[in-house]
Each structure stands twice: as structure tokens, then as C-alpha cells.
């Protein structure tokens, strides 16, 4: 069989290591048999090295040490690490002996501790942390620290995310403050994945297999005290490559790196990240428009379909829905459906409503019987107002007065006098008799 992926000696060494670490042997044997029996070549290591070198990483860890306790930094940062209880010489994406295993045995302390000067290399601004990893199994349930510090942590999985949220959620942690996470399984189990965390400005982004998986408005400094963490936050994965940059990589750079891995990515079902928002239009606004937007993540291409009251809107298949010259027929609930080969999701409904204009109402008044009283209100510019009506003690024959649009140019102040004379006054409050068609008295 061409392209055997793990020699018998390597298999036996890994078997003994897993027995010592109490790793789930069923999962391990399935993994090793898949590595031995599947024909084909290893991923192109030279192509990967060329792509990474072109973007000038600060720290670059290869995990290709077959023995010893030193994890060598192949980047200019020069921050070496010490292996503690980690399985060396494992089969990786790029070949035999190219990865290290972090079984996360509760009786051991599997991790890498970086040199004592690690705090000198903390990154307080933008950064990128790139991983080629193989996450072990499902249902882990506890936090998994990838790069960990005293104050912060980059997490393959957040604490108890399956039990609390019903799915796996990766993200970043500020100890003593909060765990920040993204919904969904960030790295699929039991397969090699390319996973990248990017801090860019006020956002933390997570890319999975070349695709932006999600973004959150929370950031932490990158502190490189260890890979994995002693205690309950141990990593349960194999690592082939870890690369750190002291800047934010672009989406194009990340896509290039992913292509160099040769990984065939799984389809990620879409998720809605930003929901469309409800909007109000003031009645009579000339040429009124409404714009609905959303954002979604998932494996491309994404198919988009906007709906009104649950019915597809013909031709509305872009990320933005623009409604122009709005009338009462446009009032309703708008939502968007997003789908790909992995599934479909429908956004929350956003309501479009037409509302009365805001107005300024005159003060309350107290008058003697038989004396006139005037109540007034100021309406903004606009068209389409059909009339005014007194709020209480209405006489159906006398208290409703229609004001034709022809009499309503510019801001106006409308006054209701005793005897129900509806008057329109200009900015100088000059009284002008209003149209009293139909007024009986």
C-alpha cells in the first residue's frame, strides 16, 4: 500500500504511550488504522513552509522533536519551550514524527512550559495564532487551552460549553473577567484542521480551514506562558504546527496558508452573526426607504433569500435588502434564509412599521366657563396627514376637521378654538381660517 502513514514501530510506541495516559483506546485505534490504511501522500511540507516563511512569523513551533524535552522555536522570537508529559514523534499532517500529542490525562500534567522570559514576548496589540491540530473525539465537556498565560487564554473549547450551551464553543478567556466564545463546533473532532485566531482592532476572529468562522467584539492580550494548562483546562489534541505573528494576518494570507495544508475541509453550516434590525418609517415621508442587512458565517458559497411574512421576495438574494418609496403595502416582518451544503438557518424577523410623526403639544389650560380656550400642536414637514381630532369630549359633527394637503406647505401650528374653529397659524402665529367643509356649527 503506497503512502503508509504510520510505521509499525510508531504505532506500537503510540499504543504504549496511550495506555500509560489512559487515552480512549477505541478512538486511538480508529485513528491509527485510518492513518495506516489510507493510501496517498503526506501533505506538502515544502509548500507549507514556503507559505509560512513568506509572512514572517515571530514564533514557529514544528513539534517534530522525536525525543528530549525541548520544543524549538524556529522563528526569530527565540522562545523555546519544555515538554512535560507530552507524547513526541506522533504522526502528523505532514508526515510521521511531525506532531506531539496532548492526551489531557487527569493523572498527568501534559503541557509545554515556555522559557522564563515568556512575559517579555506578550503581545498587547494585534496578533495571530495559527494551529494545525487534530482534536480528539467529542463530548469532552471541559475547557481546552491552546496558548495560555497568567491572565489570558486562547481556547480550543470553552469551559463546560457542551453542558451549558448544547454545543462546542471556542474563544478566548480573560481570567477573572469572562470567557468569550463563538457558537458551534469550532474544530471538528477526529480530523486534521487548520485553525487561526486573529486579534484585529477591537475584534477577535476565528478562521477554520480558510474560512472566517466567526468574530466577537472581545479581545485579550496574547500571553505565551504555556501550551495547554495544568489542571482541568488541558488540551486533548495533537499539534503539528503552531505559528505566532505579532500582527493581524489578512483573510487572503490565511486562505493561502490553508491551501498549503492540503486539508479537505468539512462543510460548515451557516450561522447568523448579525440579525436584521426592525425599522420605523414616519407616515408621509416622501420617497421613504428602508435597508435591512445581516451577516452570516459558513462554508462558501452561501445561498441567500429574503422573505416578507415568510414568503420569498423575488430577486432578493443579496446581503442587503433595500425597499424604496415605501407604502403601507410594505409593512410586515422581514427575515432572511441562508443555506449551503451543510444546512440552512433563518434569521430573526425584523419589523417594518409606519408610525405617526412626533409632535409638540401645547400646555394644559384652565378657563372660566364661556371664555375661549386654544390648544395647539406643531407637526413636522411631510405629506399624507389626513386630519386632526380632539382627544376627549369629541362631538362627531364638530370635533374632526380635515386639513387638505394643499393648505399644508411647511411646518405648521394647528389650533383648536372654543366653538371648534380649526385654525392654521404660520410661524408668526397669525390666525388664518381653516377649511371648514362639513362643519355644522
Image (cartoon, rainbow, N blue to C red):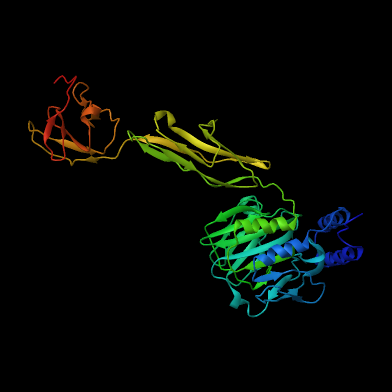
Is 118 on the left or on the right of 135, as rendered?
left
Q: Nearer the viewer, residue 441 or 33?
A: 33
Is 131 on the left or on the right of 431, as rendered?
right
Q: Position of residue 81 (x, y in %)?
A: 71, 75
Residue 30 seen in the current view: yes
The quarter in which the C terminus is drawn is top left
Q: Nearer the viewer, residue 168 or 272?
A: 272
The quarter in which the N terminus is drawn is bottom right
- Residue at the (45%, 32%) spot, across then down: 332
Q: Nearer the viewer, residue 339 or 103?
A: 339
**Numbered disc total:** 0
Is 345 on the left or on the right of 107, as rendered?
left
What is the quadrant of residue 42 in the picture?
bottom right
Q: Nearer the viewer, residue 3 or 131?
A: 3
Q: Residue furthest bottom?
A: 116
Residue 157 seen in the current view: no
Q: Position of residue 119 (x, y in %)?
A: 60, 77
Q: Position of residue 118 (x, y in %)?
A: 63, 77
- Residue at the (49%, 36%) spot, across then down: 334
- Relative vertical location of residue 121 with respect to residue 102 in this rendering, above or below: below
- Residue at the (55%, 41%) spot, across then down: 347
- Relative vertical location of residue 395 with respect to residue 206 in this rendering, above or below: above
Q: Position of residue 439 (x, y in %)?
A: 17, 21
What is the quadrant of residue 47 in the picture?
bottom right
Amino acid at each position: 500500500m503506497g503512502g503508509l502513514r504510520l510505521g509499525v514501530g510508531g504505532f506500537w510506541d503510540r499504543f504504549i504511550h496511550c495506555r500509560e495516559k489512559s487515552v480512549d483506546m477505541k478512538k486511538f485505534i480508529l485513528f491509527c488504522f485510518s492513518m495506516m490504511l489510507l493510501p496517498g501522500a503526506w501533505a506538502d511540507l515544502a509548500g507549507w513552509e514556503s507559505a509560512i516563511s513568506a509572512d514572517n512569523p515571530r514564533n514557529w513551533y514544528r513539534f517534530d522533536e522525536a525525543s528530549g524535552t525541548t520544543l524549538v522555536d524556529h522563528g526569530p522570537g527565540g522562545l523555546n519551550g519544555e515538554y512535560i508529559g507530552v507524547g513526541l514523534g506522533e504522526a502528523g499532517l505532514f508526515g510521521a514524527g511531525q506532531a506531539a500529542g496532548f492526551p489531557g490525562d487527569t493523572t498527568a500534567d501534559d503541557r509545554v512550559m515556555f522559557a522564563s522570559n515568556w512575559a517579555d514576548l506578550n503581545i498587547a496589540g494585534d496578533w495571530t495564532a495559527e494551529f494545525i491540530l487534530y482534536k480528539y473525539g467529542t463530548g469532552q465537556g471541559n475547557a481546552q487551552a491552546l496558548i495560555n498565560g497568567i491572565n489570558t487564554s486562547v481556547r480550543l473549547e470553552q469551559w463546560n460549553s457542551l453542558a451549558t450551551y448544547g454545543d462546542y464553543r471556542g474563544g478566548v478567556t480573560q481570567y477573572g473577567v469572562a470567557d468569550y466564545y463563538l457558537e458551534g463546533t469550532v474544530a471538528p473532532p477526529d480530523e486534521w484542521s487548520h485553525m487561526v485566531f486573529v486579534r484585529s482592532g477591537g475584534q477577535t476572529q476565528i478562521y477554520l480551514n480558510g474560512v472566517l468562522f466567526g468574530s466577537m467584539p472581545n479581545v485579550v492580550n496574547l500571553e505565551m506562558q504555556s501550551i495547554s494548562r495544568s489542571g482541568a483546562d488541558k488540551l486533548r489534541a495533537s499539534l503539528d504546527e503552531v505559528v505566532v505573528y505579532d500582527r493581524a494576518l489578512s483573510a487572503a494570507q490565511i486562505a493561502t496558508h490553508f491551501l498549503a495544508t492540503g486539508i479537505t475541509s468539512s462543510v460548515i453550516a451557516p450561522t447568523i452573526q448579525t440579525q436584521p434590525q426592525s425599522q420605523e418609517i414616519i407616515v408621509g415621508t416622501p420617497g421613504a426607504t428602508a435597508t435591512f442587512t445581516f451577516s452570516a458565517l459558513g462554508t462558501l458559497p452561501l445561498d441567500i433569500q429574503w422573505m416578507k411574512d415568510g414568503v420569498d421576495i423575488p430577486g432578493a438574494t443579496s446581503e442587503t435588502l433595500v425597499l424604496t418609496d415605501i407604502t403601507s403595502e410594505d409593512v410586515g416582518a422581514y427575515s432572511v434564509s441562508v443555506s449551503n451544503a451543510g444546512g440552512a438557518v433563518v434569521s430573526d424577523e425584523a419589523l417594518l412599521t409606519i408610525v405617526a410623526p412626533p409632535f409638540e403639544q401645547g400646555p394644559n389650560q384652565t378657563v372660566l366657563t364661556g371664555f375661549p380656550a386654544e390648544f395647539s400642536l406643531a407637526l413636522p414637514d411631510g405629506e399624507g396627514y389626513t386630519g386632526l381630532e380632539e382627544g376627549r369630549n369629541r362631538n362627531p359633527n364638530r370635533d374632526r376637521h380635515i386639513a387638505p394637503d394643499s393648505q399644508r406647505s411647511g411646518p405648521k401650528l394647528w389650533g383648536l378654538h372654543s366653538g371648534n374653529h380649526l385654525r392654521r397659524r404660520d410661524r408668526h402665529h397669525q390666525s388664518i381660517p381653516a377649511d371648514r367643509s362639513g362643519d355644522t356649527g
